[in-house]
Amino acid sequence: MTGLSDEARIARATLLRVSEAATPLVHHVRAHGVEATLADIRAGALIPGVDVAALKTRLAEADGADDLAQAARVDARLVCPGDDEWPALLDDLVRIDADCFGLWVRGPERLDDVVARSVAIVGTRTPTAYGEHVAGDLAAGLADRGWTVVSGLAYGIDGAAHRAALAAGGSTVGVLACGIDVVYPSGHRSLVSRVAEQGLVVTEYSPGAAPQRHRFLVRNRIIAALTLGTVMVEAARRSGARSTLNHARDLLRHTMVVPGPVTSAMSDGCHVALREVTGSVVVTRTDEIVEQCGHLGELADPLSGQVRPRDRLGPLVRRVFDAVPVMRAAPAERIAVTACVSTEVVEPSLAALRALGLVERLPDGWRMSRAGRDERHADARPDLALPLDWL
Amino acid sequence: MTGLSDEARIARATLLRVSEAATPLVHHVRAHGVEATLADIRAGALIPGVDVAALKTRLAEADGADDLAQAARVDARLVCPGDDEWPALLDDLVRIDADCFGLWVRGPERLDDVVARSVAIVGTRTPTAYGEHVAGDLAAGLADRGWTVVSGLAYGIDGAAHRAALAAGGSTVGVLACGIDVVYPSGHRSLVSRVAEQGLVVTEYSPGAAPQRHRFLVRNRIIAALTLGTVMVEAARRSGARSTLNHARDLLRHTMVVPGPVTSAMSDGCHVALREVTGSVVVTRTDEIVEQCGHLGELADPLSGQVRPRDRLGPLVRRVFDAVPVMRAAPAERIAVTACVSTEVVEPSLAALRALGLVERLPDGWRMSRAGRDERHADARPDLALPLDWL
C-alpha cells in the first residue's frame, strides 16, 4: 500500500482508538493534523468542545502500532486519507462535520475500486418475507449489473442484501459497528467471513471494540458516504435505517425507498421517509436504482424500450434543455432566466447538452440542434421512471 | 334554486347537448357568452378550432328545455355557473382550458356545500383485496371526519370508496361519464341510487348520453376539479386514474398516492405516479390526507404535535412566501420573479398569505409581517409531512 508513512499510519490508528468516530475533534484534526492533535491531547491543551482530559486517559492506554499488529492477525489493514485506496467519497463527510479518520479493511479488493459503483441497501433487522425477498432481489440485480452492495451485516434486510450479492457472484461491503476482529452478530460469523473473502469488511472501530449501541448510528454515516445512494427496504417507524437515509441526503447522495403495503408496520418507516426525506424517490426494481445512481448514458434496461436522451438528463439539466430556443439562438443568461436556474447552473448544463449533441452554440448564443428538436418533440415516455425534480 | 333565468338555463342545457364537454368551444363561450355562441353556431359563423358545421347539425336536434324535462323525471337539476350551488372549484378548469359549462345533479344536497371539504379516491376497476381494503378504509375515515368522498362510480376502487363512505354515514359524490338517467355500470344500479339518496350523482353529459369510452377520461377532470385533492389507490401501469391525478396536478390540487407491494402489478401505476407526477406525496392513512388537504389549522392528529402555518401552505404559496422580502417591501411582480411563479399565481398567493397574517401590504409592495418572520425562522418540523415542492 502506498500513501502514508508507517509513523503517520500508527498515529492514525492511535487517533482512531482515542477519538471514537466523529467527535468534535474533527475540527482540530482538520486544522492541525493528526500528530499535532495527539500531542495537544497528551499535553492536556484546550480543544474547544472536546473533553481533553478523557481523551488523555484513553491516549495513555492507546498504542496504534499494537492495533495495526492486532488487525494484521485477521488480515486487516488500515486505510487512511492519503492512501491510494482511500475513496474520495469518504471526504464528503467533511460536509456534515463527521470526518472519517481511517477505516480498518479486511478483504482482497481495493476499497476505492469496490465502492466506485456502489449502492447501500438498508432496513429492518426483523423483515417480513416481502422485505427479505425485495432486498435480495434488488441486491442480486445490482450485483448482476456490476454494482457493489454496501450494508451493515446485521440480521434481516442487511443480511439478505449481502447474501444475495454474494450468491450472484457480486462484490459486497459490510460496515461494522465493532472492531474488525469482532464477530457480531454471532449468527453472522460465516456471512462476515464470506463477505471478507469475496468483498470487504470495514470499520472505523479499533480492534477488539465492542458493538456498543451508539456505534451503530455513527457507523451508518459510513454506509451512506461510501455509496452513491442508499435504498431503504422495510423499516419500522423508528429505525436505524432512517439515519442512514438522512446521512445520504445530507451527503447529497441519492435517497431511494422501496414502498410496501400501507397495512404493514414494517413499511411504515419507508412511507414516512418518502414523505419526510426531501428528494427521496420510490424505487421498485434494480433498473430504477441504476437509473438513479448511474452516470449519464448508463442505460438501465434494454428491455424497457427506447430510452430517449432527454430521459437521461438530471432535473436541472432537463429544465435548461427545455428552455433552449428552437430556432433563434439565445445567450446563456437569457436561457437561465427562462429556465429559472442560476447562471452557475446554466453554463455547465449547456456544455453537457452540447456534448450530448442536443444543443448547438452559435455566435449569438445557444439553440437546439436537430437532434435536440427531435428530442423536444418526442413525447416523454410515460412508463419510464424519472427522478423527481430536485428544486 | 336562485341564479340563472329559465332562458339562460335552457341555453346551458342546449350548449351541453351540442358541445360535448371541454371542446375548443370554451374560448368562444368565455368571450361571447352561451347565447351568442349558440347563435353563432346556428348561423354557421367561423369559430377558430371548432367544427361548426358538425355542431350546427347537433344544435338542430338539441332542445335544452326537453333535456331539463327529461332530467326532472329522475329528479335531476342542471347547476350552472352563476347559480348559488355552483362550486367555485369548478371555475379552476379554466386554468386547463377545459371549462365546465354546467353539471346535471341528482340528490338532496347542495353541490357547493358537499364538495367544500372533499377528496377524490380513484383507482383500478380490478383491485386486489389490499386495494379494496385500503380504499374502503380511507373513505370511511374521511366520512368519519366529515369529508366528502368523490369518485367515478366504477367497479373496483371507485365502488369500494363510495360504499365505505355511505356505510360510515358520510356524503359521497359520484361523477358519471353518461347521462344522469343512464345506469352504468349495470351492476352498480343500487349503488348509484344510494349515492343519489345520501349524496349526489353528477355529470356533464346530457340525459340519455351513453358512457362512451372517451367520456371517462374527459369526466376525470371533473373529479379532480370538484375536490381539494385526489388519492390514487391501486392502479395498473396504464390506468384512467392517472389522468385524474394529472388533472389534479394541473389544477394545483393535492396529488396523493397510496403505495403497495412492489411485487403487485396493481400498485405499479401508483409507484410510477409517485416517481412521475411532480408534487405527488405518499399517503397511508386518513390523517395524512386530511393533513394534506385540510385548511390551515385543521389538525389531522392531535398526537402529531404543533403544526406551523407554513406547513399548511400549498407548494406554490409556500414558494411565494419564501420569496417575500423580510424588511424592504417588494412589488408583486418582483416577488413573482424571485419565486419563479407567474403573476397570475403571485397575486392570489399574496392575498392568501395576507389573510393568514404572514405578509403585509405597504404602499410600495409586500413584505413579511412579524408573524411571517417568526414563521420563516421556525424550523420546519421534520416529523411533519410536507408536500414535495412543486417544481
Image (cartoon, coloured by chain):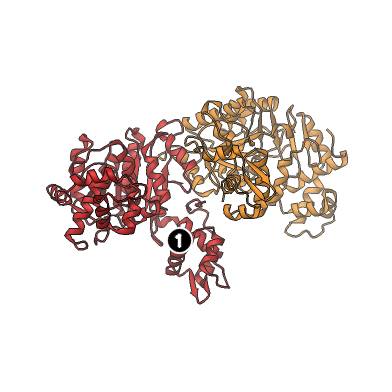
Chain colours: A orange, B red
Q: Which residue is mark 1?
A: B344
Q: Is residue A110 left or right of residue A302?
A: right
Q: Is residue A151 visible?
A: no
- Picture coordinates of residue B242, whole percent (x, y): 40, 40
Q: Is residue A207 left or right of residue A9?
A: left
Q: In this picture, is A350 found above or below A40? A: above
- Picture coordinates of residue A93, whole percent (x, y): 70, 47
Q: Residue at x 56, y 28 (%)?
A: A301
Disc 1 residue type (three-letter): Glu
Q: Residue at x 78, y 36 (%)?
A: A78
Between residue B208 and residue A117, name the one nearer to us: B208
Q: In this picture, is A14 found above or below B294? A: above
Q: Is residue A283 visible?
A: yes
Picture quadrant of residue A8: top right
Picture quadrant of residue B110: bottom left
Q: Residue at x 77, y 28 (%)?
A: A75
- Picture coordinates of residue A353, whole percent (x, y): 64, 42
> In this view, which residue lies farthest toward the bottom?
B363
Between residue A389 and residue A112, name the one nearer to us: A389
- Picture coordinates of residue B30, whole percent (x, y): 33, 57
Between residue A167 and residue A354, name the one nearer to us: A354
Which quarter of the rendering shows the N terminus of chain A?
top right
Label 1 CA crowd tier, 10 Å (few <14, some 14–19, many 20+): few
Picture quadrant of residue A264: top left
Q: Assign a secondary structure to mark 1.
A: helix
Q: In this picture, is B58 found above or below B301? A: above
Q: Residue under mark 1: which chain is it in?
A: B
